[in-house]
Image (cartoon, rainbow, N blue to C red):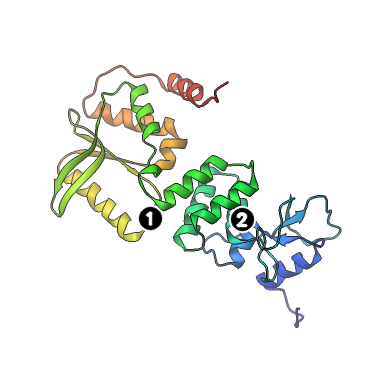
Amino acid sequence: MVTHNGPLDRRERIAATWLAAPPGSVVSGLTGLELDGLRGFEDSRVFLTLPQGRRPTALPPSELHWSTCLELGVDVHVARTPRRTIIARSLVDAASWSAHQRHARVLIIAAFQQGLVQADAVTAALERRGTCRHRALIVESVLDALGGIQSLPERDFTWIWRVLGLPPPTRQQRLKGADGQYYLDAYWRELDLAVEIHGAPHRAVNRWDADVVRANEVAITGSRVLVFTSFAIRRERAVVADQLLRMARRCGWTGQAPTREEFLALDALERRPAA
C-alpha cells in the first residue's frame, strides 16, 4: 500500500503494476530477478507473466507474457510480494526473452556468479519451460558458469582449424613459467602460436587472474597468443577463423585456406540440422 502522494519509487511501481494485472499474474523475468537481488541488469520495464488466456484491461506500461505453468511453489514463490516467479524460472525467462545472445549468456553467468541459483534449479526450470528461444545457449552458459572440461567447446574449435587447413595443434601443451607449469589449450609448435579458450568470463576473480598471468607468461616466452571465449568459438566461428588465420599467416603459415565466403557456406552447412 502506498502511504504518500509523491512519485512512486521503483518497487512501488512494480507492485502497483502487479496489483492491476489479472488474478494469477506474477512479476517475472528481469523484474523478478531484480526483486530477488540480481545486480547489474537494471531495466525500467516491468515484466509480467499472465495465466494463459487472461487479458489485461488497464495496466500501467509493462511487458506482458503468458504461460500455462504458474504453479505455486514450483514456478512461483509461495510467500513473496509482489508475487513472482522463482529465481531459476525468472532467469530462464529473462534469458529466453533477450534479443541478443550475448546478453542472455552474460545474464545466466551473472546469476551464478552472484550466488542466486544452482544448476539443478535452472535445469528443472528449463525443462518445465519447454521449447524457448536461446535454449541451447542457456544450457551452454550454465556449463560455462560451472566450469569443468565439458564447458570447453573443443569440437567446435577443432572444426574451425580443420576447415582452415591448419595442421593439428598440440592440446594441453605444458609450458614452464616463472611461477610453475602452465598448460596451453592449443599450441602450434611450428608457428609458435598458442590459443587459449576461456569459459565463463571472470567466473572467479582468482581464476581469471591466473588465466591472465598464464597468457602473459606465454607471451613473455616469445609465443604469439590468441584468446577466445567459448561463446565466440561456438557462436561466432567466422570471427574466430578470421583472427586465427591472420595470426597464422603472420607466424609464417602459407597453406591454402578457404575464403570468408567459402567458410561461411561451410559453417552454415555444418550447423544445418540433420534431416
The residue tagged 1 is 202
The residue under the point 34% across, 60% down is 205
* Total numbered circles: 2
* Picture quarter with the N terminus: bottom right
Query: From what the image shows, is residue 241 above or below residue 65?
Result: above
Sequence-wise, which precedes: disc 2 or disc 1? 2
x, y (%) of residue 94? 61, 52
**Foreground residue, 113 or 192?**
113
Q: Secondary structure at mark 1?
A: loop
* Picture quarter with the C terminus: top right
Q: Secondary structure at mark 2?
A: helix
Query: From what the image shows, is residue 201 above or below residue 161?
Result: below
Find out whether the residues at labels 2 and 1 contact each other: C-beta distance under 8 Å: no
The residue under the point 70% across, 72% down is 12
Residue that sits furthest to the bottom in the current view: 3
x, y (%) of residue 44? 65, 61
Q: In the drawing, does residue 166 fall left or right of residue 22? A: left
**Foreground residue, 62 or 196?**
196
Numbered mark located on residue 229 in the image:
none
The residue under the point 54% across, 48% down is 104
Q: Amino acid at mark 2?
A: Arg
The residue under the point 31% across, 16% down is 256
The residue tagged 2 is 89
Q: Amino acid at mark 1?
A: His
